[in-house]
Each structure stands twice: as C-alpha cells, then as structure tokens.
Image (tube, helix red, strand yellow):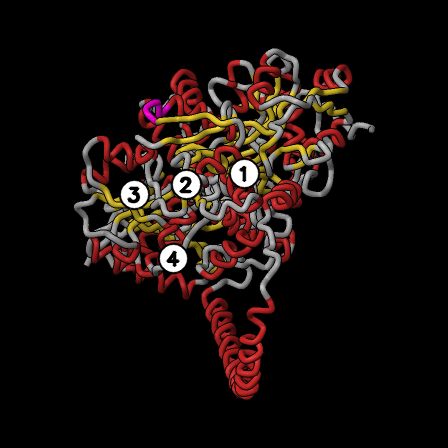
Amino acid sequence: MTAAPINVLAAEQVTLQLKWLHQFQFAGYYAALEKGFFAEEGLDVILKERDLNEDNILQVLEGDADYGVADSILFLFRDRGMDLVLVAPIFQHSPNVLMTLASSDIRSPRDLVGRRLAFYDNDTEGVGILAMLAKHGVLRDGLMRYSLNERMAKLLAGEVDAVTAYSTNEPFIFREAGHGIRIIDPRHYGIDYYGDILFTHRQEAEQYPQRVEAMRRAVIRGWHYALDNKEEIVDLILEQYNTQGKSRAALMNEAYGLEPKIARHTIEMGYLDTGRLEYILDQMESLDLIASNDQGVQGLVFESGQNSGSRRLNLTESQEAFLSQHQRLRVAVDPDWPPFEYYDAEQRLQGISADYLRLLEERLGIEVELVRGLTWPEVVKAIANKEIDLLPAVSSTPERRQFLNFTQPYVRSPMVIVTDHEVDFIADMNQLRGEKVLVVEGYASDEMLSTHFPDLDITRVTTSIEGLRQVAAGNAYGFVGNLAAATHLIRSDGLANLKVSGQAPYSFDLGMAVRDDWPELVQILDKFLASVSQQEHAAIYSHWVELPVEQGFPWRSVLPGLTLLLLVLIILGLYTLHLANLNRKIRQANSRLFQAEAELRKKNEELEEVSITDKLTGSYNRHHLDRVLNEQAELVRRHQRSLSVVLFDLDFFKAVNDQHGHQLGDEILKKFAVLVKSKTRSSDIFGRWGGEEFLLICPETNSQQACLVAEKIRMALESYEFPAGIQQRLSAGVMSLQAGMTIHQLLSGADYQLYRAKEAGRNQVCCDQPPSLEIS
C-alpha cells in the first residue's frame, strides 16, 4: 500500500493578533506555541496582545497581522465590503453579556432605554449584545453609550448603569469582592452568536491555503491540550502572560467557564455550521445590523483541503523519516469492548477502532500488526514494556501518562452508572457509598473512582459484559462504565432489567496512545486525526453505535385489531380529505393575501430607505440627519448627556471635479463615506449635508472626544491614496450641544469652527467655542 502525498513545510513566520489582553481566553494559542504544535506544522507564530487603542480586526485586514481572533462582529465588517475569511470558530457560544448591580432596577434589555451603558469603543466585538438591544428596541428608543475605559469602577460609582462583560471574567471578580450583580445574557433572549473565531484576510486564504490549514490544525490541537491541562496552562499564563495581574482563582474560574462556551464535548472543535451562520446573518439583517445578506455564506468560510477530499498530512522531514523507519506498528486492543473494539467469532477485529486503523493504514502507507491473546491489563502492561507500539482507543489518565503519550481525543462518551431498572436517579457519586460497585480492571473508570472516591466499595471485573451480568443477576448494586459500550451490551445481551441511572463526573475521552519514547508518532497521529473529516467521524460512530431495529413483531396477535383500526382510519381519512380540500383553498387565499402584504411591506421599506439615504454615497441624507439631531437633542435634555457634531468639508473639491471630471469626484465622495464609517462607532450617525459637506453626529461624546474622532478621520483621509494620484484633504469644525442651546445654534457653531479651519489654511480641525454665541 502506498503512502498518501506528503508535503514538508518550511518554517514560515506569521503573526496572530489577539482580541484582548492576555488571559485564559487565549489558552489554546499559548499551548500551541509552548507545546510546539505550531512548530510541528512549520509555523513560526508571533502572538500579539491587543492594543486597546487599535482596531484589532483592521490590523489583520490591513496587513499588520496575518491572523486574528474576533467574534461575530466580523459579519459587520464583511457587510462593509471587507475581505475576510472565517477559519475556525473556537467558541460556539459567546461569553459576552451585560452586567448590572443587583441593587439596580435593570432586569431585562428594555430596562436599558435611556440608561448609560459602557460599551466597546470601536465596535470590535459585542455584536450579540447589539443584536439583543436592537431586537428589543433599545437602540431605536435611545441608549446612552459610554467608553469602556474603567467601566467596572464607573459601575460601582454609579457613573454608568450597565457594562459589557465576559461571563467568565468580571462576574467572578465582582462576586469575589462581595458585590451583588445581575447578568443579562443575549442567549436568554434568542441571540446565540459565535464567540471567538480564528480568521484571516482573503489574500492569505487564497494564496496560502495549506498554511491556513496548518494554522487551523495547530490551534485546535492547542485548545484541546489547554482544556485537558487547565492547571498547567494557568501556571504558564501566571509565569509568562499575566499582563493583567489576574489571580490563579480567577484564571481557573475562566478556564472552567469557557468549557461550555467552546462545547467541544457536543460539537467538533472548530466546526462552523453554515445553516446556523445563514440564520445569524438573516437575523442581523432583520435587525438592521447589516445592510443585506444577499451574499449569504458564499466566500465567507475557509474551505479546507480536508473538507474537499485532500488527505495531505503536511508531515515534517523528521516525521516522514520516522514513518520510513517504522513501516509496521504493533497494535493491541481490548478484546471484548464493543462497540469500540472486539474480536468476532472468526477473531477478526471489529468496532470503531478497526475502522480508524484501516484509515490509518491507508493514509500513512503503513501496516498494522495486531498483537492478540492479551487481556486488557496485559495490554497495558505490554505497551508500558515497549512490547506494543500503539493503542487505538484509550482514555488519558494521570497514571497512564507516566508511560504513554496521547493524541487529542476523537471519540467522547460519558462515564455512566448502570443499575437495576427499579433504582431511582443517582445525582451524586456519594449515593453509591455502602453499595457494591463494579468496574473493569485497568479501565479509566477504575483509576478515576479509586483515586477520587476511595471510600466506595469497588470490585473489579475482567470485562464490561461480566460486570453488567452481575448487576442484572443482583450480585452488585451498579456498574460504572462507558455509555456507548454499556447500552450496546445491554441491548445485544438482552439485559432488559438494567438501565442507566446516573452519570459520573468524568467521560471516556478516547484518543490513540503511543509508547512514550516515540513522540514523533503522536505528532503524526494527531495530523492523521485532523485529516479525518467530520463526515467520516460521524459515519464511523453511527455505524457502530446506531440503535438496532427490533425484529420479530407479533403480527398474528395484533392483526384483528389492526384490521378494525384500518376501517376506522379509512372513514376518518375520507372525511379528513374533504376538510383538507377546504383548508387548501383557504390557505391559497391566505397565501395570496400574505404575499400581497409582504410585497407592500417590502415596497414601504424600500421607500423608507430611499427617503433617508443619499443616493450617491449610501450614507444618510440631510432630511434624516435633521430628524436624528432633534431626537438626540431631546434625549440630551431629558437625561443631561453630552452630544457633539462634526461638520466636514472636502478641501478644494470643486477643482477635482473641474480637472478630473464628476465621475472621479463622485468616486472620492463614496470612498470618503466608507472611510468615515470604518473609523466611527455604530451609535454615531453620519451623512451627507450637501455637496462636499458631511455631518457626523456623536451621541454621548463631548467636544474634546469629538475632536479626536475628527482628527483621526482627517489623518486617515490624508494618507488615503485615490486614483490618478489625487490627494484629498478635509477641514472640520466641531461643536458640542450646551445647556439651552438650539439645534440651529449648534450647527452654526460647527459651521463657524469649519470657517476657522479654512481660514487657518485648511486640512485641520477646529474645536473651540465661537467668540460670541448667544444662548437662549
């Protein structure tokens, strides 16, 4: 048998931009770096901690980093025309929540209308919270948005009413300090978006797909390792990455809190459900968070080689050399552990392990030599003595890790308690005290229970079926073993008086185990398991764990009753057909009405969109800006908040139209509108005021903060390269709304500041108060 194609990767330096400051949230990346998983894939990875003054997503899209970590806010950037590609979602559920003090009267999203919320400054995460607020009309009816800086101190001081938080971080800190809190989780209100996602820019995905695949594999391996070795990675963070000064307790709380967000025991690590993604995009469109979902998921998700059928393992030179020197591997299995591994009557290996070993031979081009005739304890002893090279399905335990190296798990099954069917539900292992409990000698269940529950009356048996039969015969109270194996044996052996009565606080996380003097083989096997597609994993598992079809139904005893029932059903069927025909006609009429209503609603939405949008730039028009200004001014007066406006004018723009034509001038206006939107918050309102003048409305912003925003936009435009070598500049005037000031005076003040900027030589921002502004 020939080996699958092998690529040898040279070391390539890539930069990974994290979305926040160092903490367990990025443990998988630390593990992949420190344990050499990146290096094994030929990658020299640099981890960059977040600079909170920078947009970490734009840092990737603009080429400052090759890969990044962000949440579903990425879909907003994609909607703005940014070329990004999702590589692997690590968090299936977002930890982003809102947190208030328990003493407040805020209990639901609607309670936040008119309140003060500390939110992310540059909209680089928190889209699930935005969606929840939009769904409940909070964004529409008014929300005072504050900077994220010092948000926890502001919450305690009463300067804000609510803050964004990670459910794995800030709540623990507040509770530890004795502060009562209340959590508003978007998942409780129908918003369940992806959390941290590994992403890259399109150029990287298209030009270096093998590097993207290698990055994905190493990251997933790193996360499995980090979650399996939480305390070790917490020690690593405390030693090398603890820039926040977190305590061990806080990091461990975060580590355990992230497990259900990652959900690796129910969903394959890194799996992205395109159906779920389509639903999220549709929901975001319905909430006006994105303009359109016409693109759908096309081009958004990285299509890895393993999904398209490629089986290249990207082995290093040393790994390839190892395989060439070890073309035959000695393998042993548990001889009687269906459906995972067992020998049939003809002594042929069957079960899940057999299918994975066949794939292993095919993809690595090696031969598997089965070592037969050993019990499970003898198998474990043999591999400890290096008489066996590989175990295909075994759980990693502290004792076994002393002489074995393990791959990442590829099959997970809960550890359960099987008893007589009359036993009530067992909610806690301590309920087994004083009862005779059976385990298979040498199994993970034996080691775990002996170590953590030494007071239990544990008796060891040779095989799972022996233990189950003893429980069925009343010779023992319960048997602790693997769910899939126990249910398979109960059905196949006809042990109808047994049931699963509870679950132990452990699971059988089955991976492959290798003798500890062959570390290269573990690395090769991890790459092999990463090459197995989700469909192949599912097909193997369902083939052996699928529920059997009951045979021998007693037709003769039930046939007379069925005949009578059939006659009744025929009569009911005819009457039902008559009703169905009437209902069909009613549905058709209703459908026509609904269709007409939907078309009318769509037309109204289109008319509303046209009425508020500037046709050329796609930003808001002056009519809409006037209305928003009045609404915002009313909110300011009601809640005594700040509001500022920035009036922009493109310098010497008439000369551009005269010298290069209106078509190029129009293109500059459109690109300027896109640039401003990328540099402002989602709560800011931007539109075309007229000609080459634009207005930016900044709620919850004083004049000093608005000046910084205007200056950031001015500098961005100054460095922007337009076609035909055009260098466009702008002047801007900033004004904040003061007590007693009218909208007209606010705009006049901004116009006065713009005039000052032009008089001073243009290409600058003026923010001072006008010298003689009368306030009435």
The image quadrant that residue 52 belongs to is top left
- CA–CA distance in space, label 1 to label 2: 15 Å
Which of pointers 3 and 2 indicates the residue nearer the eye? 2
- CA–CA distance in space, label 4 to label 1: 48 Å
- CA–CA distance in space, label 2 to label 4: 50 Å
Q: Earlier in the sequence, mark 1 or mark 2?
A: 2
Which segment is the magenta one?
452-456
The crowd level at tag 4 (other Cα within 10 Å; few <14, some 14-19, many 20+) is: some
- CA–CA distance in space, label 1 to label 3: 47 Å
Which of pointers 2 and 4 indicates the residue nearer the eye? 2
Residue at (70% x, 20% y) in the render: 330
Residue denoted by label 1: 485
Residue denoted by label 3: 163
The answer to the question of whether label 1 and label 3 lie on touching residues, with beta carbons closer than 8 A, is: no
Residue type at mark 4 is Ala
Residue type at mark 1 is Ala
Residue 663 drawn at (x, y percent):
64, 57
Residue type at mark 2 is Thr
Residue at (45% x, 47% y) in the render: 497
Residue denoted by label 2: 419
Residue 600 drawn at (x, y percent):
50, 77
The crowd level at tag 3 (other Cα within 10 Å; few <14, some 14-19, many 20+) is: many
Residue 560 drawn at (x, y percent):
56, 76
Q: Earlier in the sequence, mark 2 or mark 4?
A: 4
Residue denoted by label 4: 134
The image quadrant that residue 382 belongs to is top right
Q: Secondary structure at mark 4?
A: helix
